[in-house]
Amino acid sequence: MRSRPVDTSSQFDAARAYLKELDVANFVWTGLKRGSSKQNFLWPESKPMENPEGHWAVEVPKMDEPLCAAIDPSSDYRWQPLPCSGPTVAAFVCQMQVPVWAMKEDGCMITSLPSLTITFLPEQGAVELSSDCGLDGTRRITCKGKAVST
């Protein structure tokens, strides 16, 4: 479970389409962060950002304070460089693989959407996917984002 990087134009277009479909109205943190104007933006795994053409809504300012990239719905879901500290907190998008237990045929196979529960845990900054497996108990997987003020 990790923040979802956008390395290709098709991934960028898919992320924009997904957020548009959800009608997201607030900033969404991409996971990209730049320590100073002399550094490149990096994903949380320290992987450098590749080919950002067309992703940014505005030119990235030359400033020494750390910048974080957030998706801005008011700019056609393009990225805005924002200070990483401030009063507003952006949401995050997680990429989660479907857990093996969600596909098993041992009584915990997901046969319909209601058997899955998706819960936002604001105090943990996390999204939890859980399934009631009857006598086998409940199975859970959690995606935690880093709280980043913008």
Image (cartoon, rainbow, N blue to C red):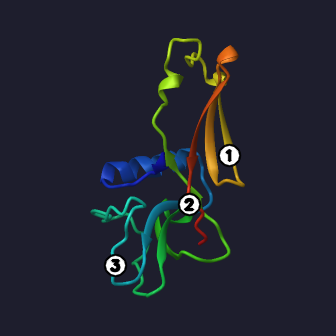
Residue 84: name its quadrant: bottom right
- Look at the image and tell me in which quarter the C terminus lies: bottom right
Which residue does the image show at 65% across and 18% down from the upper left? 136
Which residue does the image show at 72% across and 55% down from the upper left? 123
Give x and y (percent) for residue 140: 61, 33
**Dot 2: element:** loop
Give the residue pinned by disc 3.
39
Which residue does the image show at 69% across and 48% down from the upper left? 121
Query: Which residue ends up furthest to the right in the rendered image?
Result: 123
Q: Earlier in the sequence, mark 3 or mark 2?
A: 3
* Near-viewer residue (41 or 44): 44
**Dot 1: element:** strand
Amino acid found under the numbered disc labelled 2: Lys
Q: Earlier in the sequence, mark 3 or mark 1?
A: 3
Q: Is residue 86 left or right of residue 17?
A: right
Which residue does the image show at 63% across and 77% down from the upper left? 86
Give the residue pinned by disc 1.
120
* Near-viewer residue (36 or 75): 36
> Rounded to the nearest whole Å, what is the CA distance between mark 3 and mark 1?
33 Å
Q: Is residue 83 left or right of residue 6?
A: right
Give the residue pinned by disc 2.
146
> Rounded to the nearest whole Å, what is the CA distance between mark 3 and mark 2?
21 Å
> Rounded to the nearest whole Å, what is the CA distance between mark 2 and mark 1?
14 Å
Q: Are marks 3 and 2 in contact (CB under 8 Å)?
A: no
Give x and y (percent) for residue 54: 34, 64
Q: Are marks 2 and 1 in contact (CB under 8 Å)?
A: no
Give x and y (percent) for residue 132: 67, 23
Number of residue marks: 3
Amino acid found under the numbered disc labelled 3: Gln
- Above or below for 150 versus 9: below
Q: Is residue 104 left or right of residue 39?
A: right
- Above or below for 84 versus 78: below
